[in-house]
Amino acid sequence: MSVTLCNDVILHVSILIFRCALHIIGVRCEKMKNHVLIFRFCLVLFLDEDIVIAQHDFKPTNDSDLPFKKGEKLKIIQENGDWWLAKSLLTGDEGYIPCTYVARAHTLEVEKWFFKDLSRRETERLLLAPGNKIGAFLVRESETTPGAFSLSIRDTAGEQGDVVKHYKIRALDKGGYYISPSLTFPSLQELVQYYSRSADGLCLRLGSPCKTIAPQRPWAQDEWEIPRETLKMVKRLGAGQFGEVWMGYYKNNQKVAIKTLKEGSMEPEAFLQEANLMKKLQHERLVRLHAVVTKQPILIVTEFMTNGSLLDFLKTDDGKKLKLPKLIDMSAQISEGMAYIERKNYIHRDLRAANILVSETLHCKIADFGLARIIESEYTAQEGAKFPIKWTAPEAINFGTFSIKSDVWSFGVLLTEIVTYGRVPYPENNCKFM
């Protein structure tokens, strides 16, 4: 007997027993209906506690993975980290699935417009990202009021450009929700349906739910050193002093960035040191390292960022359209990543727009840790070491002394790159000033 059929049998038998119990204790018919509905709802939640619904298509890279399509129901057998063991209620097959691709059945998480753990700032970033239009909206849990929610809508403000407006959704003591006390709703779904038909006091009528892309699939923990044959290089993205960066695929279906090392350009140990550092530093504003190929020629595999470097993106037509508030937001994202690096007692030493990568939703991440070092208070570079002069602090140029302060100097130069849409710092190349 299938899991779904078994649950249906349990549900109907339990409701029948509950009806009999109510009849025995003398509950009136008009009240019995309400009691049964409440009991049925609670029982469905209990029986479907381990049932999830796929929010995105998933193609496996390993034989142990379970493929599924968006909307498919699965039963969770075991939860362990980012990968859960599950069984498809459609095919009966079992395998591992990424937990970020599914949502619990009979919860708000299955609604396209609901975003559970989202800050106000991140909400604005998502709604103002390319692909969303005026009227795009989402509902999220309130950061300040437990049990309440916030409705966020993309609107326009004339010359200021598009903005995001927020409305508090409050909960009633007896159940239900409201934005205006004069108009209440039994559920968030009904509230959203109503304001999708009429603005009725909001800045405008709700349009389409905020668009999202499939999250980065978690990388298997045991896939650190991988065979070269599992990688396919497709397009060269750029080249530097020590090697090249390619867009490629891991096991033919997971898009990744592949960093190569030119033979003789630097010691393999130093190249792998960068990989080990990236593996140690994990933050949403830092490019995530996936794996390495340790045999010559050495490769580093990282997450792929669709819009490439911030320097190149700012020079594109889309980049030139960005207004000051978005440029400030990008700067804030970079500062979040650098604050994390400082907390870990590291210095980057090569912070510039060319080493910031941009995602499809215009999220910025810090990359290229080739010069990064752990420090106590200061770090003195080896004699003959090369630095990006225009981004390097004077004390670092003159004495080779680096600290958090020298990274702050580089961040200041990076800000000039952002507000000038990628212009080279000190364009006059004034050697006397330098």
Image (cartoon, rainbow, N blue to C red):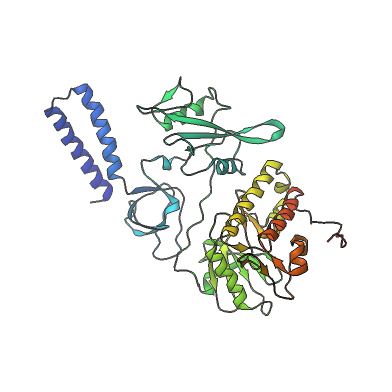
Q: Provide residue 357's location: percent of width, then percent of height.
A: 64, 56
Query: Which residue is rendered at x = 51% and y = 55% of the image?
Result: 216
- Give percent across and percent down for residue 68: 41, 54
Of residue 198 and residue 261, the one placed in the foreground of this image is 261
**Between 101 and 363, the one nearer to me in the picture:** 363
Where residue 61 appears, as percent x and y from the top left, is 46, 64
Q: How many labels does the image show?
A: 0
Give residue 83's quadrant in the image.
bottom left
Q: In this view, does 421 lie to the left or right of 59?
A: right
Q: Residue 272, how many percent across, how many down? A: 58, 73
Q: In this view, does 126 lie above or below 218?
A: above
- What residue occupies the far front of the structure in this picture? 377
- Up/down of 89 relative to 21, above or below: below
Frontmost residue, 331 versus 207: 331
Which quadrant of the view contains residue 237? Answer: bottom right
Q: Height in image: 247 above or below 42?
A: below
Q: Can residue 297 be seen in this view?
A: no
Residue 230 visible to the viewer: yes
Q: Which residue lies furthest to the top in this view?
A: 182
Tell me the quarter of the image containing the C terminus: bottom right
Q: In this view, does 277 lie above or below 12?
A: below
